[in-house]
Amino acid sequence: MGTADLPNILDLLIQEIAIQDARPVHPAFQVFTDALRQRFGEALDAVVLYGSCLHTSDLTEGIADFYVLVSDYRLAYSGRLLAGLNAWLPPNVFYLEVPAAAGVMRAKYAVISTADFERGARQWFHPYIWARFAQPARLLYARDDQTGKRVHTAQASAVLKFISTTLPVLESGPSDLEMIWASGLMLTYAAELRAEREARARHLVRIDPEIYSRLTAAAMPALIPLLSLQADGRYHIGPITPLKRLSARIHWRLRRWQGRVLSVLRLSKATMTFRDCLDYAAWKIERHTGIKVEITPMLRRHPILWGYKVMWQLLRRGVLR
C-alpha cells in the first residue's frame, strides 16, 4: 500500500473518531477548557480530554487528564526555558486546580505542539503518544475545523500504529477484541514506568467494548492481511513470518529500555512544571500496584534518584520486567 492511498483508507476511521470525540462529557470540564484557553491564548490549537476521567461523574475525586495542543512552543510560553524543554522532550506536564461547588477539581495537562502530536501518533518509535490516543478521547476545543481534522487524523494514525505493532507479537489464528487490545495495552505499559496489571488493561476494554469494536472495524481496511474478520464474527490474525515476529519482539524490548530512560527524564523535567509531581507519581503507583514508595527529603531534592529507586523496586518485585 502506498502512502498516497493511506488518507482514503483512513477516512472511515477518521469519521468514527470524530463521532467518538464529539460525545458529551460532564459540563464541569468546560471550566478546565476555559482556564486553558485563557492560559494559552493565541497559541492554543486544541484541548483533548483522555483517560479514566471519561468514566467518572465526580470530578472532585482523582485527577483529570488533558492534552493541550499549541501552534508554537515559543508562543505558548513567556520564557525560553519551558519552550526549549518542551521542544527537547515533549510534552511538558503541568498541574491545574479549579474551584467547584462540591470542592476543588484537579487536572494535569500535557503541552505539545500539534506537529509533534501528529508525529508522535504516526511515527514515534516509543508509544508515549500513540498508546494514549489509540484509546477513546474527547476533543473539547479546536481552533477551527482544519485543526479538528488534524487531531482526528492523528488519532486515526495512533489506532493503526497501536494495532499494527501489537498483532505481530500475538499468535496467528482466531482472536478476539479484548485479547488484541489488552495485549497491546500491556505492551505499552511495560514500555513506560507504569505498573498497571493485566486486569486493568482488560477492564479498560470492557468499559467501552462497542467503541473498541467500532475503531477496530474502521481500521480493518488498512490492516489487511494482518487482521481480518471471520464469518463467525471473531477476528483472525494473519500469518506472521518468524523474522517479523522476532523483529516485533526486539522492538518491544527496545521500547521498554527506551521507556525507562524517558520516564526518568520526564519525571525530572516535571519537577520544574508539575507541583507535587512525586506525590502524584507515588499515589498512582500505590493505587495500581499496592506498593507504597517512600519519598524521603533527600529523594525529594533529587527526583532522578527517586525515579531510579522506584524502577528498581518495581523490577525487584516483578511488576516491571
Image (cartoon, rainbow, N blue to C red):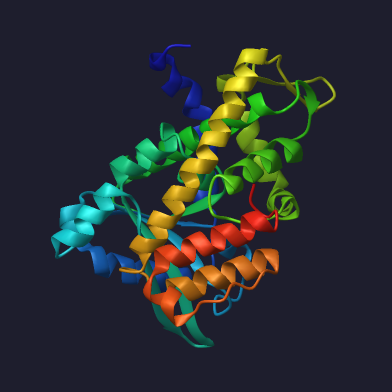
Q: Is residue 255 left or right of residue 119?
A: right
Direction right: furthest residue? 232
Vertical position of residue 247 compared to residue 105: above or below: above
Front residue of 205/291: it is 291
Residue 95 image position (x, y, % from top left):
39, 71
The answer to whether residue 48 is seen in the rendering is no
Front residue of 232/15: it is 232
At 57% from the left and 21% from the top, the residue drawn is 247
Residue 207 image position (x, y, % from top left):
71, 54
Vertical position of residue 194 compared to residue 281: above or below: above
Q: Quadrant of residue 224?
A: top right
At 42% from the left and 23% from the top, the residue drawn is 7
At 73% from the left and 54% from the top, the residue drawn is 203
The answer to whether residue 265 is seen in the rendering is yes
Q: Is residue 136 left or right of residue 143?
A: right
Front residue of 300/14: it is 300
At 52% from the left and 31% from the top, the residue drawn is 161
Q: Quadrant of residue 166?
A: top right
Residue 291 image position (x, y, % from top left):
67, 69
Vertical position of residue 148 compared to residue 40: above or below: above
Residue 276 image position (x, y, % from top left):
42, 76
